[in-house]
Image (spheres, rainbow, N blue to C red):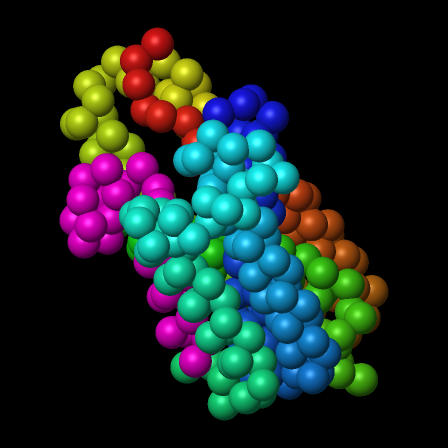
Amino acid sequence: MSDRLVLVQISLAALQNVLFATATGVVVCGVMGQHAGLLEQVKLLVWRGLLITLLTLTALAYLWLEAAAMSGSPLHNAGTAVGAVLTRSHFGKAWSLEVAGALLAALSCLLKERGFAVYAAAVLLWIAGKTATSHAADSGDFSLRESAHAMHLLATALWAGSVLVSAVLLRGSLWSSGAAARQRAKFCYTLSQLATAALVAALVTGVCGVLHVKAQSGSQVLYGGWGRLLAVKLTFVILTICLGGYNRIMMLPKLRKNAEQDGFASRAAQRRFNWVLSVEAVVMLAVFVVSAVLGHTAPMVG
């Protein structure tokens, strides 16, 4: 497989991670915003529909790339191998689950407010497909390692998606007219609670995944190329934790304390909270890129 093809696959995988997390974040933030009386749900449905459409297109593109990689065909002739990849390979079955999830997610957009349960089912299908094509599948289908990785993907999507979407929403373009500081503070508090819970779940399941890799490949794998990539990812994760912790410990109490006045102090605290959240969202994108590289790097010593 050429280095250029691998690079394109990594780029597409990173983009898929971002699109899936963002679409999930739109759903979750929509629920939080509705609870706080803030968000215009129609605009969020348009957002979600666009994100799911792009996600489906990237899945189709990735199938074409994988067909080229498996068959050894030039990229422009890979179409002849697509059928065989879909019907005769483990990747093809897993990919079918992903696309079924994407299509179900698109259907949830048509159902509007009633589509939450449908979207939840779509998330499970997409994650099942992604898990089956990851390194976790090396332990076999329906293994404990696969289950832990699936939970890791779900927790990461909830954590990262809520941060990414909230960083945009808190700019105010989708707030309902007349949104008060008290409502924004309520939204930020709920966001912090969700992000913290999802982060803990992502960390626990992530550690389980690393321990499985270490058990299968030996402790020396942590000192090789895969381990160095993991260290880079952990550095970015720690940075996001510090940023989120700063907002939770320092800024959130100020937001809630000054929410009733809706004056200068409240607006200043909200601006600082928004700025830190935006930086956290940018670092989260870096986490997704490194995760995609890790997913295409075999854990081995050296």
Q: Of all residues shown, which one is farthest toward the top? A: 302
User: On screen, 54 above or below 232?
Assistant: below
**Residue sitting nearer the eye, 23 or 55:** 55
Residue at image coords 43%, 80%: 118
Asked if the magenta segment contains residue 236, the reply would be: no
Question: In the rendered image, is residue 182 in sight?
Answer: no
Q: Taking the image as drawn, is residue 103 in sight?
A: yes
Picture coordinates of residue 244, whole percent (x, y):
55, 48
Magenta: predominant secondary structure element?
Answer: helix
Query: Which is more toward the observer, 148 or 269?
Result: 148
Q: Along the horizontal axis of the image, is 4 left or right of 85?
A: right
| Range drawn in magenta | 118-147
Q: Is residue 201 left or right of residue 146?
A: right
From the viewer's side, name the closer residue of 229 and 199: 229
Nearer to us in this view, 200 or 49: 49
Residue 15 placement (x, y as % from top left): 60, 47
